[in-house]
Image: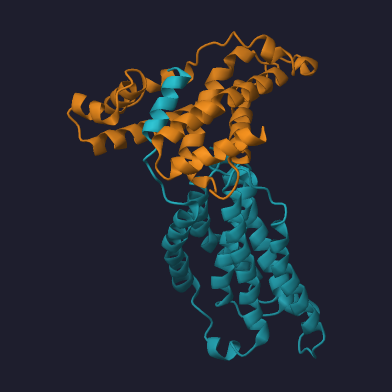
Chain colours: A cyan, B orange
Amino acid sequence: METDQLIRTLAADNAHRVRPVGFVLALALLAAAPVSVAMLFAGLGVRPDLMTAMRNPFFDLKFAVTLALAIPAIAISLHLSRPEASLRGWKWLLLIPVGLLLAGIASEMMMPQRLPMMTRLVGNNSRLCMTAIPLMSLPLLVAALIGLRHGAPTRPAVAGAIAGLLSAGLAATLYASHCTDDSPLFVATWYTIATALVTAIGALAGSRVLRF
Amino acid sequence: MREREDEWTGLMRSAISGDGAAYHRLLKAVTPALRAAARRGLARAGQPVDQSEDIVQDILLAVHLKRHTWDANAPFAPWLFAIARNKLIDSLRRRGRRIFVNIEDFAETLPSELAAQTAPASEVAAQLKSLPTRQREVLQSIAVDSASIKDTAAKFAMSEGAVRVALHRGLASLTAKLREK
């Protein structure tokens, strides 16, 4: 087929319209979220002292940190779905959860503590945390990759990594309602390891499925 | 340069608001720039520059299928060249860099000297054969016989809507096949 013929064919298809990337991403995440929520309720359940825990600022901080990761990661992944986009100017958004965690650790240090630092850091649920967050993030990661495939990310591994951060942030938000370890030291250690794992999976998957 | 790019942005805005003729003009207008970029890339990678047409068609298909990622408030050229660069790198990688000749010094002059010699594109045509019959017939009718959607519908006793669907599906699966190759 000659290029002029191809151009004529493409022009004939001009009327075809597709949904914006944001719409497809939102739809995919909304479809995947119930799966992750079901995993939470079927496998773990929320902690029994949820109502009391909500009065503990360090319990609330977990949600602030995980959402401060998930929401900017959604914004960045939408940005990266455009071919000419770069991370410049956007990657700083990912420092928000880091800053929140550091502030949390600092304020916990300043309070009188019943438990020594290492005990708070190791916690009771570290192994569960490292398994549950990646497992619950998988449906969300698949959804995020489906959404981004609809876009045109020219750096597929980076876009995949951000999709990993996004899904780990959302999964960690769910997991936080089960986990009884509220110390920011625990969150900074084990949630971070779990998130890093999902990010690596996302980068690997992205470099394969996000090329267009 | 600046003027040319503003013109592209204007044409693309008309195109996404439904002006098929503006879209046709835009694709025609950007093709020489894409061809030059493909030739430069091939030359830099030490590949025969006369293979540029397959890359040009690859880029045009990607531009078409990903045009919803263009932000109508942004200039068109950076978006276009980001797609082009991506496709160029991709196809150089697929071709493999078997010929290790350092001709970087000639990169700027070589393509224009050989501008007249370009092998016809063959990849899209080859993949076209593997499409389902209906999609292939519709694509050929519009591409080769330059029939309109309406005429194509009449010729195959299809509705215009069905022709449009076959056309779009055909283009999408052509692109997918080119990527898998």
Answer above or below: position of A58 versus B95: below
Q: x, y (%) of residue A111?
A: 79, 89
What residue do we see at 50% from left, 34% from top? B62
What residue do we see at 61% from left, 90% from top? A55
Q: Nearer the viewer, residue B118 or A48?
A: B118
Q: In this view, which residue lies farthest toward the left?
A: B157
Classify residue A100 as left or right of residue A150.
right
Classify residue A24 as left or right of residue B148.
right
State whether residue A68 appears in this view: yes
Q: x, y (%) of residue A136?
A: 52, 63
What residue do we see at 76% from left, 85% from top? A115
Residue B157 position by quadrant: top left
* Rendered-image quadrant of the N terminus of chain A: top left
Q: x, y (%) of residue A72?
A: 63, 63
Residue A176 position by quadrant: bottom right
Classify residue B69 as left or right of residue A180.
left
What residue do we see at 27% from left, 33% from top? B163
Answer above or below: position of A80 versus B153: below
Q: In this view, which residue lies farthest toward the front?
A: B3
Answer above or below: position of A127 versus A22: below
Q: x, y (%) of residue A121?
A: 74, 75
State whether residue A116 appears in this view: no
Q: How many marks?
A: 0
